[in-house]
Structure formats: C-alpha cells, structure tokens
Image (tube, rainbow, N blue to C red):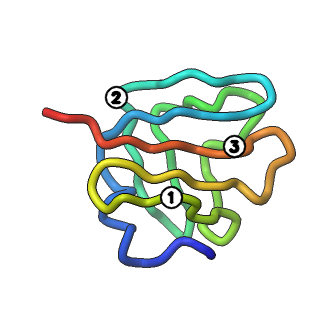
Amino acid sequence: MSIHHDIHPFLEGTCSVQILSDSLHAPIYGCTLAIEDSKLIIRPHILFDNFADELLLSDLETLEFNGSDLIVLKVNSSSNLKTLTIVKEKY
C-alpha cells in the first residue's frame, strides 16, 4: 500500500516525528512537514547526515493511519531508515 492523497492534509503542518532506524530512535518535536514536487519535506533538517530530508512519496508506504493523530510510514528507499512515525501535536 502506498501513500494515498487523502492523507496529504495530515502530512502537511506542524507535528512531532519519531524516527526508527538502525542508529536513531528519538522523538523530535516542532518540525514542519510539507509536500512539494511529490516529496515529503521535513523541516528543520532532522534526519542528519545519514538520511535525506526529502523523501519521495513513491518510496513511502503507509503502515498505520488513524485519521487524526498518527501515521506510521515505511521508508522503502533506505536500508537504514526503516519507519517514520508522525504524531500531530496537540495545542
């Protein structure tokens, strides 16, 4: 299953991101996500030197989506970066 257009509004905006990789597993708060040119853009650049901060939507697969608070994406294009867990911040 790939990313569907109905989750694009969820992916755009302010949130916290939890990264699961072979070398990093920590929540990062206050980042901004945007979709530009068929890429998921993460700002500020939080994925450091090991990963790109622009992930092609075609390389992402939805593993879990509850509709309002959480989405878990599998990253198919990286051997190090396994998943991104994106949680909407509560105001």
Left or right placement of residue 72 versus residue 35 in this view: right
Q: Name the residue under label 1.
A: 64
Quadrant where the C terminus lies?
Answer: top left
Count of numbered circles on the image: 3
Q: Toward which corner of the image does residue 51 lie, by quadrant?
A: top right
Q: In this view, does 9 lie above or below 55?
A: below
Q: Residue at x 76, y 59 (%)?
A: 76
Which percent across, then down, holds residue 65? 43, 60
Q: Is residue 78 above or below residue 47?
A: below
Task: For the residues labelled 3 and 1, say whether their Cβ atoms are less than 8 Å apart.
Answer: no
Pointer 3 local density, CA inside 10 Å: few below 14, some 14–19, many at least 20: some
Pointer 1 local density, CA inside 10 Å: few below 14, some 14–19, many at least 20: few
Please tell me the numbered disc located at residue 30: 2
Amino acid of disc 1? Glu
Amino acid of disc 2? Gly
Q: Nearer the viewer, residue 9 or 38?
A: 9
Q: Toward which corner of the image does residue 6 lie, by quadrant?
A: bottom left
How far apart are the alpha carbons under marks 2 and 1? 21 Å
Q: Which residue is drawn at 59% across and 67% down?
A: 57
How far apart are the alpha carbons under marks 2 and 3? 18 Å
Please tell me the numbered disc located at residue 22: none
